Image (spheres, grey):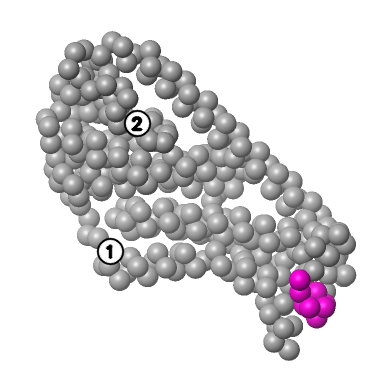
């Protein structure tokens, strides 16, 4: 049991500190933002699963009731292989620390979801107030696309079921039809990929654990990569040049990305679209995604190793 706890702790620390720093310095995430998002999610899943399985083992060692429930279906030799009866004092302290971390993580996630729902409700109420001012002949507010009368050029999406796409008349006057298609394809890319859930998760973890490098980098990189992924969705449909021009027309008066959380210069996205970097080869992309998806299985393999050894013996 002690060996498993040490391995799980080492794995969690490796995924939480050096791995994200190396990933932020890599150049390929800009070329493949979707793959990079998967890798970041797998790193986060590895840390969370490592902590959860360590908490389960520690609780089973400290509390007889938990041990009886966890190992009830297993043969007696499996429980003996974990040697749960010889739990040191530091294992009990680690279990309490992990339990507090799990409770805090749950509270942060619940808080983020409640606040997101509240913000979404206020945004929808604001839209309902502005919808009656629509000029004649524009789409109705009940459709998937809502057009608001506003000289300020803007376009965004409101998460929900279904997601609501909003565009102002200022954007309609400023953009050509092809550029408008690119902007709407960008926002639909966010909606189809459900980027709101990923943003909520990264924000909650970064808020709850601001000093953990993985969660801090995960939040920053997620806000950046979802925009790059949505740009790729728009460029595949409407072309790189059209998408770049649409971003310039829609954002040149601000000087920053339309996503207020990123505070990154628009030039990074425009330069990427005008000079698209070489893509990963398909087999390299598949290999990277598969390897990233298998990483979260390591905590489970470490945890079940003693039990599998006992069954094999």
**Residue at which label 1 appears:** 280
| Residue bearing the label numbered 2 | 164
Q: Quadrant of the N terminus?
A: bottom right
Q: Mark yes or no: residue 154 visible.
A: no
- Is 74 above or below relative to 158? below
- Provide the secondary structure element on which disc 2 rests: strand
Q: Is-magenta flag for residue 80?
A: yes
Q: Residues within 10 Å of mark 1 (few under 14, many from 20)?
A: few
| Image: 58 above or below 310 | above
Q: Is residue 6 visible?
A: yes
Secondary structure at numbered mark 1: loop
Query: Which of the 4 image quadrants contains residue 309?
Result: bottom right
The residue furthest bottom is 313
Badge count: 2
| First-in-chain label (1 vs 2) | 2
Q: Quadrant of residue 38?
A: bottom left
Q: Which residues are magenta?
A: 73-82
């Amino acid at each position: 049991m002690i060996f498993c706890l040490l391995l799980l702790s080492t794995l969690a620390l490796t995924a939480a500190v050096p791995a994200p720093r190396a990933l932020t310095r890599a150049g390929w995430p800009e070329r493949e933002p979707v793959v990079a998002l998967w890798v970041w999610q797998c790193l986060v899943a590895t840390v969370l699963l490592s902590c959860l399985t360590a908490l389960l083992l520690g609780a089973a060692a400290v509390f007889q009731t938990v041990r009886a429930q966890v190992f009830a279906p297993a043969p007696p030799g499996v429980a003996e292989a974990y040697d749960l009866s010889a739990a040191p004092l530091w294992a009990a302290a680690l279990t309490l620390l992990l339990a507090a971390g799990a409770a805090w993580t749950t509270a942060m996630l619940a808080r983020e979801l409640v606040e997101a729902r509240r913000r979404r409700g206020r945004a929808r109420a604001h839209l309902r107030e502005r919808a009656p001012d629509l000029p004649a002949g524009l789409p109705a507010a009940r459709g998937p696309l809502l057009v608001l009368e506003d000289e300020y050029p803007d376009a965004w999406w409101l998460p929900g079921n279904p997601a609501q796409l909003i565009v102002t008349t200022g954007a309609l006057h400023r953009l050509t039809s092809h550029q408008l298609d690119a902007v709407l394809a960008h926002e639909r890319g966010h909606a189809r990929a459900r980027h709101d859930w990923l943003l909520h998760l990264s924000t909650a973890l970064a808020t709850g654990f601001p000093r953990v490098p993985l969660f801090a980098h995960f939040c920053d990189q997620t806000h950046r990569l979802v925009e790059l992924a949505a740009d790729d969705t728009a460029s595949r449909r409407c072309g790189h040049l059209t998408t770049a021009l649409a971003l310039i027309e829609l954002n040149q008066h601000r000087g920053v990305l339309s996503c207020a959380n990123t505070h990154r210069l628009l030039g990074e996205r425009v330069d990427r679209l005008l000079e698209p970097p070489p893509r990963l080869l398909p087999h390299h992309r598949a290999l990277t995604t598969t390897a990233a998806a298998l990483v979260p299985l390591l905590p489970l393999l470490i945890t079940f190793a003693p039990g599998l050894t006992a069954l094999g013996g």
